[in-house]
Image (cartoon, coloured by chain):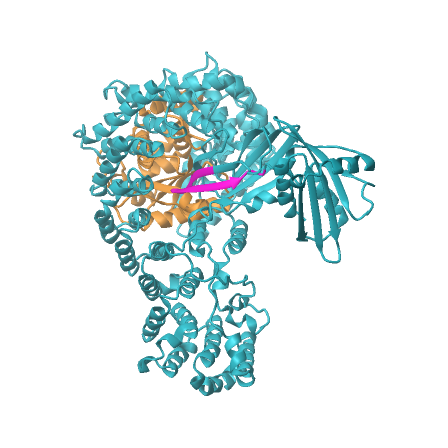
Amino acid sequence: MIKAILIFNNHGKPRLSKFYEHYTEDTEQQIIRETFHLVSKRDENICNFLEGGLLIGGSENKLIYRHYATLYFVFCVDSSESELGILDLIQVFVETLDKCFENVCELDLIFHMDKVHNILAEMVMGGMVLETNMSEIITQAEAHNKMEKSEAGIAGAPARAVSAVKNMNLPEMPKNINIGDISIKVPNLPSFK
Amino acid sequence: MPAVSKGDGMRGLAVFISDIRNCKSKEAEIKRINKELANIRSKFKGDKALDGYSKKKYVCKLLFIFLLGHDIDFGHMEAVNLLSSNKYTEKQIGYLFISVLVNSNSELIRLINNAIKNDLSSRNPTFMCLALHCIANVGSREMAEAFAGEIPRILVAGDTMDSVKQSAALCLLRLYKTSPDLVLMGEWTSRVVHLLNDQHMGVVTAAISLITCLSQKNPDEFKTCVSLAVSRLSRIVSSASTDLQDYTYYFVPAPWLSCKLLRLLQCYPPPEDGAVKGRLVECLETILNKAQEPPKSKKVQHSNAKNAILFEAISLIIHYDSEPNLLVRACNQLGQFLQHRETNLRYLALESMCTLASSEFSHEAVKTHIETVINALKTERDVSVRQRAADLLYAMCDRSNAKQIVAEMLSYLETADYSIREEMVLKVAILAEKYAVDYSWYVDTILNLIRIAGDYVSEEVWYRVIQIVINRDDVQGYAAKTVFEALQAPACHENMVKVGGYILGEFGNLIAGDPRSSPLVQFNLLHSKFHLCSVPTRALLLSAYIKFINLFPETKSTIQEVLRSDSQIRNSDVELQQRAVEYLKLSSIASTDVLATVLEEMPPFPERESSILAKLKKKKGPGAVSVNELEEGKREGGELNGGGERGGDSSTSAVGSTPSPSADLLGLRAGPPVTAAAPSAGSLLVDVFSEAGVNDDGFLRFVCKNNGVLFENQLLQIGIKSEYRQNLGRMYLFYGNKTSVQFVTFTTTSTLVCLEPLIEGGAQVQQVINIECLTDFSDAPLLNIKFRYGGALQNLTLKLPVTINKFFQPTEMASHDFFQRWKQLSLPQQEAQKIFKANHAMDTEVLKAKLLGLGMALLENVDPNPENFVCAGVIQTKAQQVGSLLRLEPNAQAQMYRLTVRSSKDTVSKRLCELLAEQF
């Protein structure tokens, strides 16, 4: 079973956290910090598995992670899951995000948290894998998008507004949003040979 | 908030997020968030009704704030309102908020349940999926109560959309995990199993998780899934990479599903049906063959997916542990991976080999890779890989390679990561003891261990070395010489001082002949360390000094001088002061004879399980147990193998110090020392389960009662309930897993049936045994239990508490009848008599209860002496009935009993007498 799915950036800022077992909010935050601490100090190109932190169950659980440019994708799983299988699952998740957002970057996860949750929900439910077929997941996500658009009708501004904000020239933003840098487009993954 | 946000909801959200991201400090961020929270709160509380769209916007903001780690204590009601919206977007945000923020004991559950109920019956697949997701996310008992009946119906209904079926399967699984009692599969079982044949691979993917979980709990009911899983697997494995279209992942057909199918098969023993088994072996061979084929793609994803299947196939082969051919192939394959350039594969290969090493077919094959593994321990850059290498070395160690492996582990310890040092130390200590042929090697190893990693050497380790040295006189001289040399190092670890103090105090005389280690030199050497040590060590050294006075009278004045100094006799620590005072007095007033008796060499320790092993088990076993449980475990460990506590300096117990915080060292709990010296040669490491074959002590407690705990150790508890009628009985055995780890391949054999092969951590399973008494007997049936815990096979044999008296039918009779029958049974062999000492208090009521528990009728006013008890009963066996009479005469003054049993069959009298003699 998957106990938790965490995404955070190189500085440990959480970008998505989904727990499939109940913890208090405090513990959840501690788990995120502990996991970041465990994962971020590891070199690139070493093994993608390690024993889980104490808070999430110690050596009973494994952390399986991948590092894409600015983001860490970490799955915390128990011994009933195949490590390499989960690694593939992370890849499917990222590739799906990449297709849905067209060159997904960290900002997409920030501004479209609800969509990311939706996509994840199409793959994993209650800690178990629901679907691994990327085109199926994308079809579902697109159907939802379509529904959203049709419902929004005249007030369809929101989606456009968000993209406007993304490209808007707010005083501070451009410095942070160097899209080219943080693009995590999948085909040229730097971390895997 | 910038004015631009007016009238444009989602833009407000985006701007808010940008604001937060631009905050220069944590304080600024908190300030901004509090402002927003206040804003949202006022909006929610305001008079103006919010439209769904604004609600959605605010709920989104709350979600974002929550992700940043801030508490959200409102908005739940608004989210629940969103659930009843007709618009997908609003409904979806509502569900999202609830699944992220609402936990299972919220009081809103009832409202949420209502909304879910509506959506489930809406027949709109999107809404149904949302509702099912919500149930799976919250998974509370109330939800299980409300929906456990409905969901199986949705799952197997013919007209349910595939995507809904998928969600329903996993939703049901979640409910089953939280409230197994509410999810009754019964009638649905076979239809659920047949989901393995579903056209839609997604449905199979979701259903297989459900089926795996259910089969672990009810293997018999779901047995049919084995053949379905095998045929599904075979279809996938033999398909071309294009057959499964979208389920082909980087040229590998359905890797995820294949892995899950192989996992499901690991819940069961090898298939009995020859055809099914043949097909499965073929699959496994194909998978192994494919590993040798050239890759279809250079991408890492391709090899990942392929190897994921391969590793699962290997796990299955190891699980079956019955096909030597496949096992050796698996081992060779793993051997290749050990040198693969992908770190992940090296890691997994080391991990799988660990389990392979415990199989008799492949242990030798695993051993051939020793050099590679040692190399991995030395050169791997990643600590998690090095740790796996250390685990594997430990698993593959046996008598033939122990010296090499221990030496390598010791040298690795010098540079090992802090995180794994303690475990490494325990492992080295265990291996050194287990495979010690020559005890000087053992002593060297442990002293080296203390030298290299003194801080990580726990008490158990040095207690143990002392126990062994005390028990083996062939190594004592060598040990004394070695510790003497080790203590000469300018900086030596306190643990070394402890071992040194203890051993020189006991066996310093063995090396005193050499002028370089004359008594005074030894004493000065020890005393030079004294001031750097902590209180418990100093206390131990003081005891060593008094032992010196006994061993070497010439050191008496020097030592008395030391004891008399203010720093000892007026020490602020009570324990040290008391020892100094008592030892000083003892040395000056006692005659040499008294001194020699009081300070005699320690007797050998009783044989017992290595406390180190217990510690390692505890360390490895329950990963997530709470502190409480751990404490309990410790206490238990102490009773089970009190080695640790008693290993300390118990020589002073004769002096009679008062208990103090360092009471451990006083050996207050010291059991009666075993006088028969000379422990058996060979391994001193006695495993909990291998002690003396059959475990007996639980058994006798059940002669007079039918229910209770038969057996308990750190891993397993076995409880018993039983009932008997005539010559028939039924016994319920409850096996409780006390750890948080699964026991796998759990089997019990007797004359009895098999049990499900898995016991989940913390779970209990039940076994029913029907018993028929054919004829009278004296040997109890044996119950053999085998299971794997961690990687290690545990084997345990217990006597089932079935005794002849269980088949008694009480017979009431008058005094006259009783004596008449008593006289009829007058042949000498029909009577058995025993006179024995009382083990318990002689309480009349307790005695009565016990005799009633025996199953006979307790006859009042029969015996002329009211103190005596008489009973009568008939033992029912299939072959015959055996009438028995019993008389128990307590003698309170002498604390003795006389027990007389007469029965129509001589063996029965004898057996009853034996059984009962232990009861009072």
* Segment tinted magenta in the rendering: B785-801
Question: Please, what is the dominant secondary structure of the magenta stretch?
Answer: strand
Q: Is residue B600 left or right of residue B879?
A: left
Q: Residue B168 or B613: which is nearer the viewer?
A: B613
Q: Is residue B814 left or right of residue B398?
A: right
Q: Position of residue A29 (x, y in %)?
A: 45, 46
The colour applied to the residues of chain B in this rendering is cyan
Q: Residue B49 or B127: which is nearer the viewer?
A: B127
Q: Residue furthest front?
A: B827
* Residue B154 visible, this orientation: yes
Please tell me which residue is depicted at 23% across the width and 22% down the height of the picture: B241
Q: Residue B233 or B128: which is nearer the viewer?
A: B233
Please tell me which residue is depicted at 55% across the width and 74% down the height of the picture: B575
Please tell me which residue is depicted at 43% across the width and 84% down the height of the picture: B555
**Up/down of B528 relative to B903, above or below:** below
* Residue B790 colored in magenta in the image: yes
Q: Residue B459 or B274: which is nearer the viewer?
A: B274
The colour applied to the residues of chain A in this rendering is orange
In which quadrant of the rendered view does residue B723 lie?
top right
Q: Position of residue A41 (x, y in %)?
A: 32, 51
* Residue B765 colored in magenta in the image: no
In which quadrant of the rendered view does residue B331 lie?
top left
Q: Residue furthest left?
A: B294
Q: Position of residue B179 (x, y in %)?
A: 55, 30
Please tell me which residue is depicted at 39% across the width and 22% down the height of the picture: B226
Q: Position of residue B157 (x, y in %)?
A: 48, 14
* Residue B1 visible, this orientation: no
Number of labels in the image equals 0
